[in-house]
Image: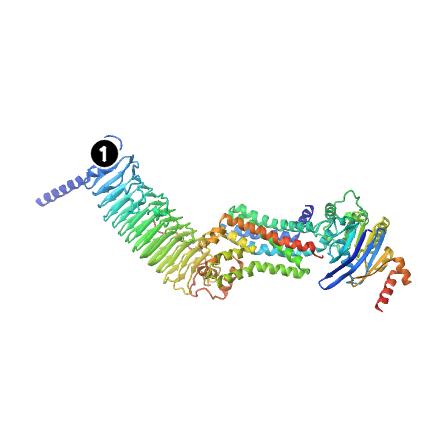
Amino acid sequence: MKLVKYIFFDLVRSRFVFFYFLLLLLFTGTFILLQDDVSKVQLSLLNIIILVVPLVSVIFATIHWYNSAEFIEVLLAQPVSRKRIFISEFVALSLAVGGAFILATGIPLLIFYPDLVSLLLMIGGFFLTIIFIALAFWSAVFTRDKAKGIGLSLVLWLYFSLIYDGLVLMLMFNFSDYPIDKIVVVLLSLNPVDVSRVMVLMKMEMSAMLGYSGAVFTDFLGSKVGMIYSIGLLIIWSIVPFFWALRKFSKKDL
Amino acid sequence: MVKIIKAAFLIAVLFIACSFNIEAKQIIVSKSGAGISSVKTALTKIAGGDTIIISAGIYKEHGIKIHTPVTIIGKNFPVIDGESLGQIFTIDTSNVSISGLIIQNTGFSSMDDLAGIRTQQVSHITISGNKFLNCCYAVFIAASDYCTIQNNFIKGNPANQQMAGNGIHGWQSINCEINHNEITGQRDGIYFEFVQGSTISNNHSYENMRYGLHFMFNDNNRFVQNLFENNGSGVAVMFSKNITMLNNTYRDNWGASAYGLLLKEINDSYVLYNHFEKNTAAVYMEGCNRIVFSRNDFIQNGWAIRVQASCMNNTIAFNNFLGNTFDIATNGSLSLNVYSGNYWEQYDGYDLNKNGIGDVPFRPVSVFSMFSENMPESMVMMRSFCVTLLDKIEKVIPGVIPEDLIDNSPMMKKINNAYPGSGT
Amino acid sequence: MLIRVQELSKSFRKLEVLKNVSVSFDANQCVAIIGPNGSGKTTFIKSVLGMVIPDSGEIIVSDKNIKNNFHYREAIGYMPQIGRYPENTTMGQLFNMIKDIRKHNGVSLDEELIESFHLPSLYNKRMRTLSGGTRQKVSAALSFLFNPEILILDEPTAGLDPLSAEILKDKIQQERKKNKLILITSHIMNDLDELSSHVMYMLEGNLMFFKTMEELKAETGEERLGKAMAKLMKQQTN
C-alpha cells in the first residue's frame, strides 16, 4: 500500500521514533554489556517489554493520531476509503514503532543470546507494540479531545500493567481455598500484558514455575500448545481493539 | 643365646606360616579350554583366602552363593548373566572381594529384592570396578559392616518404577565406604537406611527415577564431593542427625516435587561448600534443627532455600545467593533461624565504611514469595509490575515478611566458596 | 446538478447543527457560504466531503449518492482551513504521495498554482519547517492539482499574504470560467464579493437563503456584499 509507505517513512524520520530506538538500544546494550548472565539480561528486558514498550507505544500512537487529524481530513477529501486510511496509519505505525523495537532490542538479543526466551521476548514485545497502538487508536477514536484521549490511553496502560494484576491478586487472596487456577488462566488471557509475561515466564523461570504443580499452568501454559495459545491470544488482542476502533472510525464525524 | 635362637626360630615359623598363607591358591575360570568353566564350580573348590580369576566370556549363572572368604577377579570384564532368573551373587561370609565383573540381568521379583550382589550379616566386603547392568538392585548391603563399594558403574533399565530397585542399597550397616561409583537409571541411586559411620564420596548419581541419594534414619554419616544431577526428585536426607554434607554438587533437579536437597527432621548437621545450581528448590527444610549452612553457592535455582516454619536454630551464613528466583521462602510468620554474612545478589544496599559488609540489613524474603508459599496459584503473577511494586512497598513499610528473617551483615562482594580441602 | 442536498439534518449529541437543509449547486457557480460561527457551515461542507455522516437526508454528487461511497471525491478538490501535513515528509514527497494515492486516470494535472506560488524551490523542505502561509499555499495547490469539477475552499485566503491571496483569487475566477462549481466559506466579505455568483446564508443550522449575488444586492439595495449581509442580519434581529 502506497499510503503505508509514505506514512511509514514520515514516522521513521521523526525524532520520536529515533529517540525511542536509541533508548531501547541503550537499555539493551547496557544490559548485555554490564550483566554477565543471560537470564539477568532477559529478565531486565522483560521488565522493559511489559512496561516501557506498551507505555511508549500507546502514548506515541495517541499523540500521532491527534497530530495527524488535519492530514487525515486532507486524505479523507481524496477518493480514498476511510478503512484504507485507518489501516494504513495502523500498519505504518506498527512497522515504525515495532520495527524500532525489533532492531534495537529483538535483533541484538537474538544475536547475543539466540534461544527460545529471546525469541519469545521479541514476539511478546512486538505484539505488545501492536496491541497498544491499536488501543491508542481505540481511545483516540472514542474521544474527541486530545487531552482526554491521551488520558484514556494512560489509564488503559495503567490498567493493563498494574491495576488488572492487582485485582487478580486480590481475587486469589479471597478465593485461595477454591480451585481457581482455570479461572486465573482465563483472567490472564484477558490481559495482553499478562499473556506476554506468562508466555516468557514459562520458559524463563522454568525452575521456579515447575515448583508449582498446578497442572493448568505448567502443563498447559508451559507446553507447546500453551505457547501457540498465547501467540493466538496476542493476535486476537491485536485484532479486536483495532477492528472495534475501525468500525467506530468508519462512522465517526470528523 | 638360646633365647635368641628360640626367637629366631619363632620368627621363621611365623614367616613361613605367613608366606604359606600369601601363597593362597588361584583358580582360573574360563569358557575356553578344559578347565573350570563355571563360577559356581570354582567356588566349590576353594579354601578361605583363595583367588578366583574369571576370564572374559559370558557365564549364564545366577544364585551364586559365596560361603568362603575369597577374592574374585574378572579379567577383561567377563559377563555374569542372570538371564532375568534371579539374584546373582549372595555373600554370607566376611572378607570377600569382587572386582572386574559385568553383572547383569537379575530380573524382577515381587517377593524378593533381587540384587547383583547381596551381602548378609557379614563384614569387610569389597566390591570394586564392576559394572552392573539391568539389575533390579545392583549392590544390596544388609546388616553388613566395613564394606567398601567403589569405582563401580551401575545402570538400571527397568520398564517402570515399580520394577526398579536401588543402585546401592545399604541397610543396618556400619562404617561403609561408598566411593567413586557412577549410578544411573535406578529407582534411588544410593539408598541408606539405618546406616552409621559411613562415608559416601565422589559418586556421580544421575537420571535416577526417584532420588539420587535417599537417606533415612542414618546418624553420623558424611557425604562428600558427590555429584547429583537430573534425578527425578533430587536428594532426600531424612530423620537423621550428625550428618556432614561437604562439597557436593546438586544440579538440574527439576519438577513439582524435586529438590536439590530435601532435609526432613535433620538435626545437628553441617551443609558446607556445596554447590546448588538450577534446581526447582535447591534446599527444602522441614523440621530441621541446628543445621549449619555455610560457604554454599546457590545459583539460578527457583528457590534457594525453602524453610518451613517447623525449622529452628539453623544458621545460614557466608553463602552466595546468585540469580535465584527466590532466595529464601518460608510459610511461617516467625523466623527462628539465623541469617548472617551471606552474599545476596539482590541486595542493593551500600557500604559507607568500606568494611565489605552492607550498612543496611537485607531481607531475603519477598512479599511475593510469602504469597506464593501460601497461594501457589499466585506464581503466575511473577514479574508482574504489580508484584514488583508490592515488593518495593514492603521494603519501605514491612508488614508481611517475618521481622526476624533478616541478614544484618550482608556481604558486599561474592564470597569465594571454593573448597579448600583436598580429596575426601 | 453537480451537488444536490436534500433535507440534510445532523446533530451532535443534543445540539442540532443542521436542520433540514436542502440546496442544489450547479456548474459555473461560485457559492459563498456565509454564516456566523456555529451556524453549521463547516458541518455542511464536511457532510458533502463525507467527513460528517448525516443523521438523515441525502447528498447527491454528480448523480451519485455519497453514502458509503468514496469514489465521488475524485470530482472534488478540498482546501482545508488549517493544513497540517506529515511533519517529516518533504513538500515534494507530499505532492508525490497525493498524486500516488489519487489515481488521476488520464486527467491532466493542473500545476499552475504550484508554479505561481514558487513551491518547487521548497520541495526539499520538510513540512514541519514551513510557515503557516506556505502550508496554505500547499493546500491550495493540492486542491486544484487534479483539475476537479468541484472545489471546496474553507477560508482560502486566511493566512495568505496579499500577493498570494490575489494569485489564488485569480485562479478561482479562472476555474469558474471553466464551468466548475466552487464553494467558498470565508469571513472576508470583500473576497467573496469579488468571487461569488451565489450566496448561501446559514444561521443556527438553518439555510436562511440561497440566492444569486444580483438578487441579494437588488433586494437590499446595497452594492457591497458586506453591507447587504449586515442589513439582512439587522432585519432578522429586529
Which quadrant of the view contains residue B271? bottom left
Provide the residue designation for mark 1: B36
For residue B117, side relative to residue B358 (left or right): left
For residue B237, side relative to residue B302 (left or right): left
Percent coordinates x, y for residue A90 in the rendering: 65, 51
Q: Residue at x 39, y 56 (%)?
A: B284
| Closer to us: A150 or B127 | A150
Percent coordinates x, y for residue B52 in the rendering: 23, 38
Percent coordinates x, y for residue A19 in the rendering: 62, 53
Residue A34 is at least partly visible in this image: no
Circle 1 chain: B
The residue most toward the top is B33
What amino acid type should be assigned to the residue bearing mark 1? Ile
Count neighbours of disc 1 (C-alpha within 10 A) and say few if under 14, some if 14 to 19, many if 20 or more: some
For residue A160, side relative to residue C156 (left or right): left
Question: Can you say which quadrant of the picture contains the N terminus of chain B?
Answer: top left
| Closer to us: C78 or C215 | C215
Please determine whether, in this image, residue B134 is positioned above or below residue A252: above
Please determine whether, in this image, residue C71 is positioned above or below residue A154: above
Residue C89 is at least partly visible in this image: yes
Q: Secondary structure at mark 1?
A: loop
Percent coordinates x, y for residue B119 in the rendering: 25, 46
